[in-house]
Amino acid sequence: MWMKVLVLFVASLIAVSFASAEPIVVIVRHAEKAANDPKDPDLSPAGRDRAKALARILKDAGITAIFTSEFKRTQETAVPTSSSTGISPTIVAGKDIAALVSKLRQLNGNALVVGHGDTIPNILTAIGIDGPVQIPDSDYSEIFVVSLGAKPQLLRLHYPF
């Protein structure tokens, strides 16, 4: 039930975005990682489940662009959404926040950004969101929904599991 409520809420926010013509950017941390490689791990089974849940949440969100870092865990998190939308992810170096924000400012639709716990706070700040955001190392549950525009607005949500 909570999944349906979250999907409805995000869809409503996206509909408001279409009415105002301001792009919406959904920013998530990569899903849970496996322990198979300390530098560039795959997703764990729980991470693959979370990635599928993200695709269900964003099913009707009008995603027209997907951005990931160069690491497998971000790319694998985006795979179900990419498959369901037919949108191929654009890879932007994880530490190149300026390049990512430049691409986001050129959006003509809504986007998904799959980042990292240590890059998402910098992305939000660069977009124009005030206030510090901290993501604990063990937290994969946050969904940041940003309405771009003259004064970007942040809606902070959590996966329903």
Image: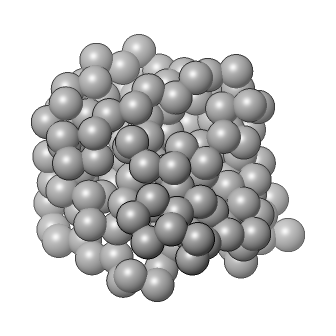
Q: Quadrant of residue 91?
A: top left
Q: Quadrant of residue 104?
A: top left
Residue at image position (58%, 23%) is 88
Q: Quadrant of residue 15?
A: top right
Residue at image position (67%, 69%) is 44
Tell whether 3 sits left or right of 134: right
Tell whether 46 sits left or right of 12: right
In the image, 107 versus 137, the foreground residue is: 137
Residue at image position (70%, 21%) is 86
Tell whether 82 sits left or right of 104: right
Q: Which quadrant, please, contains the C terminus? A: bottom right
| Residue extending furthest toward the front | 37
In the image, 115 versus 62, the foreground residue is: 115
Image: 161 above or below 94? below
Expressed as whole percent of the image width and height from the top left, the position of residue 23 reads 40, 28
Tell whether 79 sits left or right of 155: right
Examine the rendering and report whether any part of residue 116 can be seen: yes
In the image, 66 versus 124, the foreground residue is: 66
Expressed as whole percent of the image width and height from the top left, the position of residue 19 reads 50, 23
Q: Which quadrant, please, contains the N terminus? A: bottom right
Image: 48 above or below 21? below
Scheme of image coloration:
one colour
Examine the rendering and report whether any part of residue 111 can be seen: no
Expressed as whole percent of the image width and height from the top left, the position of residue 144 reads 43, 57
Expressed as whole percent of the image width and height from the top left, the position of residue 142 reads 49, 68
| Residue extending furthest toward the right | 1
Total marks in image: 0
Residue at image position (37%, 26%) is 22
